[in-house]
Image (spheres, rainbow, N blue to C red):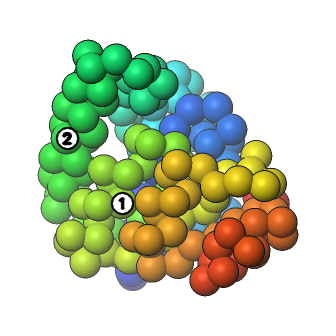
Amino acid sequence: MDNNGLNIFVVAGEGGHFEQARRVTSELVDRGALVALYSDHSSSSGLRNVNRLKNISAYSKGSGVRARLQLLLGLASLFFYALRELRRSSPSLLVSTGPVICIPFVLAARWKGIRVVHIETWSRFKSRSKTGVVCYLLANHFFYQNRSLSELYPSGDYSGRL
């Protein structure tokens, strides 16, 4: 999967996160990058190279001990899966758009020395997402899509809407 350093992993959850990742992926492919998209979204929406992940988002909404344990085990499983995929493909960059499903990939990429870009979801105007809080600390570059977030992410960059 080597394309002159333009081998990129994009990781996104379902819904609006996937739509944002789809737009990023299309733009990267148009610029000649080789992109592999990882998502728990139920449809590939006509994109090639979509790798389906187990959906763990339901566990992140639960408050009981069982839901938290399932979330922890799901995240750990995704972390080891991410390490294996990153070792196999050696991407030069990982782009994440959230939500929680991205965190194991971001951690694995940072561990392996791969650059990480996180794009905070376009649905945030006045508060940070949980994933944004974590990725703001971990990502090499952090973008937000609404100017109103500039005070919450002072080291991030405004990118405009995808």
- Amino acid found under the numbered disc labelled 2: Ala
In the image, what residue occupies the spot 41% across and 22% down?
Answer: 63
Q: Residue at x 42, y 49 (%)?
A: 102
Given residues 145 and 5, the one toward you in this image is 145
* Quadrant of the image occupied by residue 66: top left
Along the line of sight, which residue is nearer the eye, 61 or 48? 61
Task: Give how far apart the Cα atoms at labels 1 and 2 are.
Answer: 13 Å
Give percent across and percent down for residue 65. 27, 20
| Residue 121 is at least partly visible in this image | yes
Mark 2 crowdedness (10 Å alpha carbons): few <14, some 14-19, many ≥20: few
Give the amino acid type for the residue marked by disc 1 in the picture: Val
**Which residue is tagged 2?**
76
Residue that appears at 16% across and 61% down: 87
Name the residue located 36 percent from the left edge and 32 percent from the top edge.
53
Mark positioned earlier in the residue sequence (1 or 2)? 2
How many numbered callouts? 2
Q: Is residue 56 left or right of residue 37?
A: left
Label 1 belongs to which residue?
A: 106
Give coordinates of residue 24: x percent, y percent. Answer: 64, 58
Q: Is residue 93 above or below residue 18?
A: below
Q: Is residue 111 left or right of residue 71?
A: left
As helix, strand or loop, the secondary structure at mark 2 comes to helix
Q: Nearer the viewer, residue 124 or 56?
A: 124
Q: Position of residue 124 (x, y in %)?
A: 74, 51
- Label 1 CA crowd tier, 10 Å (few <14, some 14–19, many 20+): many
Please give the label number shown on residue 72: none
Please provide percent x and percent y for residue 144.
70, 66
Q: Secondary structure at mark 1?
A: helix
| Quadrant position of the N terminus in the picture | bottom left
Residue 93 appears in view = no
